[in-house]
Amino acid sequence: MEPSNLTASEAARAIASGELTSEALLQSCLEQIYKLDKEVKAFAHVADVSALETARKLDQLSSKGALHGIPFAAKDIIDSHDMPTSYGSAIYANAQPVTDASCIALARRSGGVLLGKTVTTEFANLTPNETRNPIDTNRTPGGSSSGSAAAVAAGMVPVAFGTQTTQSTIRPAAFCGVHGYNPTTGHFRMSGVREAAGTFDRLGLITRSLEDIQLVRDLLLLRPANTFKISPKPPRIAFCRSHLWNEVDGFYRSEIETAIKQLRIAGASVKEIELPSEFKSLPEAHRWISSFEFARNFAFEIDVHWEKISPQLREGRIADGLSCTPERYFESLAFMRSAMTMIPALFDETDVIVTASTLSSAPIGIEATGSAAIGSIWTPLHLPCVTLPVFKTPEGLPLGLQVLGPLHGDDKLLPNAAWIEHSL
């Protein structure tokens, strides 16, 4: 197996045992980038020379952190002191921060090698840039963590940081056939990450395995690495179609329902749940909260660089935000908090909720990033979630299964998700 095909955890073990060097791993990843990225366009910046130099230095060290010698990438709204951060906007082309975001600093402290910055949509919002889906380059990779998902799926890097404000980690991970994870809101520090809408913004992880998610989660929390284990007993599962079920692609619905039957056969306790009727208003609350915050976060760009902002962003998110009164914003926040009080009932005698990750597989074209409708239900609830790449369309396009845990239940969510993935 080529080193670039290893998961981060597999590569870390191989480096620790002396079977693999960091330099060889990094060179293998660079070969994938040189081979594929002219077409996929996952990277906004590749630090090949400095990353190789770092890898060689790490190979001379005896002390090995949890991510020792492992290449990683970061979405181009995440600051790094030694690489440009352009936020997906012409306004900041080649802009150079002077510090590392906390997630990059912690990954480097653990021995990780920042290989480059991955393409994001404009200010991590709706307007796509140039990235294509590596499974089918005629299709979108999703957004806004477009390049992060594409880079991991294409074998260019084993792990990448993304972010999510609506569905910006789960959707691209599902479209590209890799694992995507968002923690309970607030678990990961956002210092050095350009804010879109602080109420919802989360640092996300895109990887090739759930074990890798656990590995990176532990180092971001500054705790010793835990040995990753599949849950020893079947989880109690709640299957939720949600009010969007009829909008989910028919083949995809059938695959999910078949999976639910398989999980029952495998020993899981499965029940079906309906969301409270009030939850149908969550997307509207999300719209006004995120738009209100976005328009104020980007006051400088609106005032000074209006002509360099895309029409899609000006006429969409910014127009919404500028039209939203403080009263509507506060009412939307109050509604969201009211909805969150209903979360414990959803997890009554339930370990995880399973549902669709997206409405469909990746759509054709790169002019848009696909519907984020499902995320506009779940993201306002701040729940930890993961998408598992367990389905494929007859054409071979990936489809994910989303697994959600209760608030602050991340450490149980991942082993339970592993049991589900193993059973499917």
Image: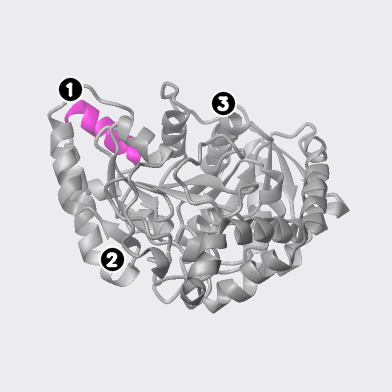
Boundaries of the magenta span:
8-18
Residues under numbered marks 3 and 2 in contact, where contact means CB atoms less than 8 Å apart: no
Amino acid at dot 2: Asp
Residue depth check, mark 1 versus mark 3: number of the one nearer the observer: 1
Q: Residue placed at 18% from the left, 39% from the top? A: 55
Q: Position of residue 145 (x, y in %)?
A: 47, 57
Q: Is residue 412 magenta?
A: no
Nearest to the observer: residue 266 or residue 12? 12
Of 366 and 320, nearer the camera is 320
Could you say which quadrant of the image residue 407 lies in? Answer: top right
Main SS category, magenta section: helix
* Residue of label 3: 232
Residue for point 63% across, 51% down = 259
**Above or below, 154 relative to 220:** below
Q: Earlier in the sequence, mark 1 or mark 2?
A: 2
> On screen, 31 above or below 250?
above
Outermost residue toward the front? 304
In the image, taking residue 382 as reference, residue 169 lies left or right, namely: left
Binning the other alpha carbons within 10 Å of mark 1 as few (below 14), some (14 to 19) or many (20 upward) gives few
Q: CA distance from mark 1 to mark 3?
A: 35 Å
Which residue was labeled with disc 2?
Answer: 37
Q: In the rendered structure, which amino acid carries the disc numbered 3?
A: Pro
Q: Label 1, on which residue?
A: 62
- Secondary structure at badge 2 equals helix
Measured along the vertical axis of the image, is residue 46 above or below residue 338?
A: below
Q: Amino acid at mark 1?
A: Ser
- Please provide percent x and percent y for residue 131: 39, 68
Q: Whole-percent x and y of residue 153?
A: 38, 56
- Chain-order first, disc 1 or disc 3: 1
